[in-house]
Image (cartoon, coloured by chain):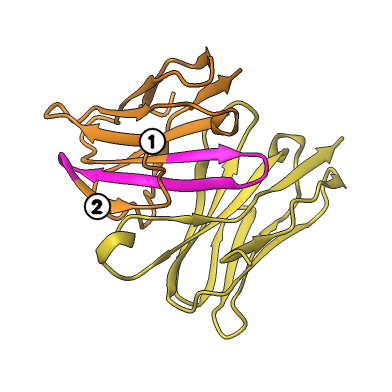
Amino acid sequence: QKEVEQDPGPLSVPEGAIVSLNCTYSNSAFQYFMWYRQYSRKGPELLMYTYSSGNKEDGRFTAQVDKSSKYISLFIRDSQPSDSATYLCAMSVNAGGTSYGKLTFGQGTILTVHP
Amino acid sequence: DSGVTQTPKHLITATGQRVTLRCSPRSGDLSVYWYQQSLDQGLQFLIQYYNGEERAKGNILERFSAQQFPDLHSELNLSSLELGDSALYFCASSVGGRGLGNYGYTFGSGTRLTVV
């Protein structure tokens, strides 16, 4: 079983819809949680970052972390065709050693927002 | 342009060969990370260098090696290539050694390696 599970989709929604993306994880040592967006033929770019549990909002994007359930979510409000991309969750432990700078990524969810 | 430069963008080579992928980090970033992205495995962490020293290691094959030079650019060497090594190889960089916080990693556009 993978440390981070993410439904690969694909997910197709109409423009203006609210999109919900989520990941579950098994490693309780994860403390840092991120969402990256990856357009075709590009490298991932950081969208949201959250430390420990709680919510964080940035414009149309809201990230939620529920450490008790080992579950994180990304909500996109008023989705736009330009939001069409692959969304990757990523996590990191708060420890040194051989995992120092490592991010563990989910498989990624392919999202298409159609006009 | 993210500021992280990877060369070459595409590489086609035969099984058993050796290739070198190059990465120049964003100006001011001291950490370089290498990731492999394939359809079945997703993004997998290979190795991290911080200011010239190896800092973290993932499930990097023994046939793969990397280094970071004094000017902070990094090279990933892949040898005895197999068909299964075909993938996108990403380099990322960060200011600090953890790549966390609101700045996170900055990824390059990747090198697409095809082994035939």
Question: Magenta residues?
Answer: B35-53
Q: Position of residue A11 (x, y in %)?
A: 82, 49
Mark 2 vs mark 1: which is more N-terminal? 1
Question: Taking B76 as reference, is A20 left or right?
Answer: right
Q: Mark 1 lies on which chain?
A: B
Q: Residues within 10 Å of mark 1 (few under 14, many from 20)?
A: few
Tell me which amino acid carries mark 1. Answer: Arg
Residue under the image location 55 percent in, 39 percent down: B37
- Of helix, strand and loop, which mostly describes the magenta segment? strand
Name the residue nearer the viewer: B69 or A9.
Answer: B69
Say which residue label 1 marks. Answer: B63
Q: Label 2, label 1: how many angstroms apart (C-alpha)? A: 25 Å
Any magenta on residue B43? Answer: yes
Left-right relation of A19 to A63:
right
**Crowdedness of circle 2 by 10 Å Cα count: few (<14), some, many (20+)?**
many
Residue A59 within the magenta-colored segment of the rendering: no
* Colour yellow maps to chain: A
In the rendered image, which quarter contains the C terminus of chain A?
top right
In the rendered structure, find residue B97 and report the number of the disc placed on it: 2
Residue B92 at x, y percent in the picture: 38, 38
- Name the residue rendered at 45%, 41% in the picture: B35
Q: What element carries label 1?
A: loop
Residue A94 place in picture, x, y as percent: 34, 70
Chain that is coloured orange in the picture: B
Q: Mark 2 lies on which chain?
A: B
For residue B95, which quarter of the picture?
top left
Can residue B87 be seen in the rendering of this structure? no
B83 relative to B17, above or below: below
Image quadrant holding the N terminus of chain A, namely bottom right
